[in-house]
Amino acid sequence: MAEASRWHRGGTPKPKLHYRKEVEIRTTLQELALYFIFLINLCILTFGMVNPHMYYLNKVMSSLFLDTSVPGDERTNFKSIRSITDFWKFMEGPLLEGLYWDSWYTNKTLYDLKNSSRIYYENILLGVPRVRQLKVRNNTCKVYSSFQSLMNECYDKYTSKSEDMDEFGLKQETEYRKFLEYISVRLSRLSIILFIPNRWKYAAPTSSSPWHWGFVGVYQNGGFIFTLSKSKSETKNKFVDLKLNSWITRGTRVIFIDFSLYNANVNLFCIIRLAAEFPATGGIITSWQFYSVKLLRYVSYYDYIIASCEITFCIFLIVFTTQEAQKIREFKSAYFKSVWNWLELLLLVLCFVTVTFNIYCNVQIFLLLGDLLKNTEKYSDFYFLAYWHTYYNNVIAITIFFAWIKIFKFISFNKTMSQLSSTLSRCLKDIVGFAIMFFIIFFAYAQLGFLVFGSQVDDFSTFQNAIFAQFRIVLGDFNFAGIQQANRILGPIYFITFIFFVFFVLLNMFLAIINDTYSEVKADYSIGRRPDFELGKMIKKSYNNALEKLRLKKPEQDEDISMKGDLAEQARREGFDENEIQSAEQMKKWKDRLEKKYYSTEIQDDYQPVTQQEFRESCVTSELENFANIRPVRKCHFGNQTEMCSTVGLEISVDFGFLRKHRT
């Protein structure tokens, strides 16, 4: 009876619950408004760093140096280089013509060529280009004994341990005389400047320069380096010198061509690297990198607006960090039980990393930019600055991605979003179990494809490529002809069984898990198990209250009051007296409180469980109890092959017709 007495006292007063609800609504809306300001500021900051001219500058430069064909051979360009002969044709043709623009199309000189070279007349060549190669030593691998009589040299793939650092070039005076005789015969009709061939020496790598990740190896900085000239004729003679002296050897594993440009019209630097890898299998594999970056940050008025956004971003970061520190101090270990709190911490960490990258990049640009521009006769290594600036862009891109994801935290009070989050949380265990089974089969097929087709099909050349190829097969992008040609028996069997088990069976099982859980969540919402308030209704209610205060809308009558009045009038017309009507209203009141006991999350702590017997003793009179039918409402569903049921409410009905006869 002690529990029932709390029901008679009414638990937490309704005005107090309403006040708690209003405070929570107001706090949520304030946090949402503040976060929207932060998000808008972050969007302005990130989009202000990206210039649409970056894409066009990269496109123009890639078209010039990658797609331009060799004179006399339209099918050969940098992308299609497969031999050393093709490489030298590219160096003496498209590269040389692309780096040096001597005059306007009318053959008029527009600027001082001794001072700078301008590509497409608008892009200043900073310093001079640099060509660098890395080699490996002989006998870095072992030749099988049966073949040692046929081949006694072995050059392994590139590693820092097998790298060749010994100088090479012409050694004897007789070799140099033969070289001059060869030059005089081959170039007797040309007027050129002869360079005495030097011995090429190894340049040690610098600690600050990043390594290059190629297709067949990872290469460090340094190597055998020579720089080009600002004069087109001098550069051409250097290429002839390198070619005739066999600068490229059997031990060559990669050659880099590096140069940097600056376009003052759009305030962008373009750092270009062309790489030609010489794998141990023979041939050449080409790759390229074009980085268009804005290293000079604060030039125009718009740049200073971006600077103010950066300051605002730092202020928001301090405020959010302080708030999260207070929450951790208040809730302690309970703070880390929420997924949204982990997302908040991840976002703060990314913001601090972004600020650190920004400070580091600006300091390095301030320290190195002046030194790089002082000497125009040397190679200006802007690759280091572009490399870290690109990483800074990647970090801030990930930051703004999670910043947008965080919006779901504020709109989860909405009915649709609440259904989505409830569906994902309920089916999480089933999805994890399904994922284990899915990836066992998926990786088994990936290994099968790699071992069977890896030597002949590019999509399966590595285990990683095989995994991505199978994801593409699921999406409908596949090369069945290549698989079938690689193995006419196992190819079709692999393809058909993979499509059947992965696409038709496993993916449909995944969709069935999601669909079944979503149906359960919708069923719960249909009987009243839903959040006690929704953000959309809050905003709509606040909007209507504002219109009513401004007298732009008539006040709405409370539905409960009007319904209560209609039912009371209908009962009076049926002939019930006031005592009977009041007894029915009292019973309906206790029914509503029982529903709140099962559904409401607000007042769950203020009310204790009440049995049906206590309900009858506390609120239903002995006379009315004979005509009231009280039964529990239960909901059942199947899970793990067993039927699970739970009570979700009480159904109370009164036979007023029998009550009238009893009264008579």
Image (cartoon, rainbow, N blue to C red):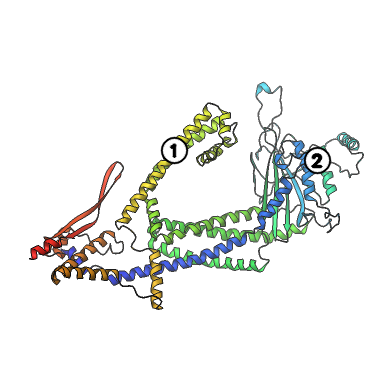
- Which element type, helix, strand or loop, lies under badge 1? helix
Which residue is more in the foreground, 139 or 312? 312
- Which element type, helix, strand or loop, lies under badge 2? helix
- Which numbered dot is residue 504? 1
Q: Quadrant of residue 454?
A: top right
Residue located at (38% from left, 73% from top): 545
> For the residues carrying marks 1 and 2, which lies nearer the camera in this image?
1
**Residue 635: x %, y % from top left:** 26, 51
Q: Amino acid at mark 1?
A: Phe
Q: How many C-alpha atoms fall within 10 Å of the one at disc 2: few (<14), some, or many (≥20)?
A: some
Which residue is more in the foreground, 538 or 174? 538
Which quadrant, please, contains the N terminus?
bottom left
- Marks 1,2: beta carbons within 8 A: no
Residue sitting farthest toward the front = 573
Residue wearing tag 2: 242
Residue 561 visible to the viewer? yes
Relative to 421, say whether 92 is above or below. above
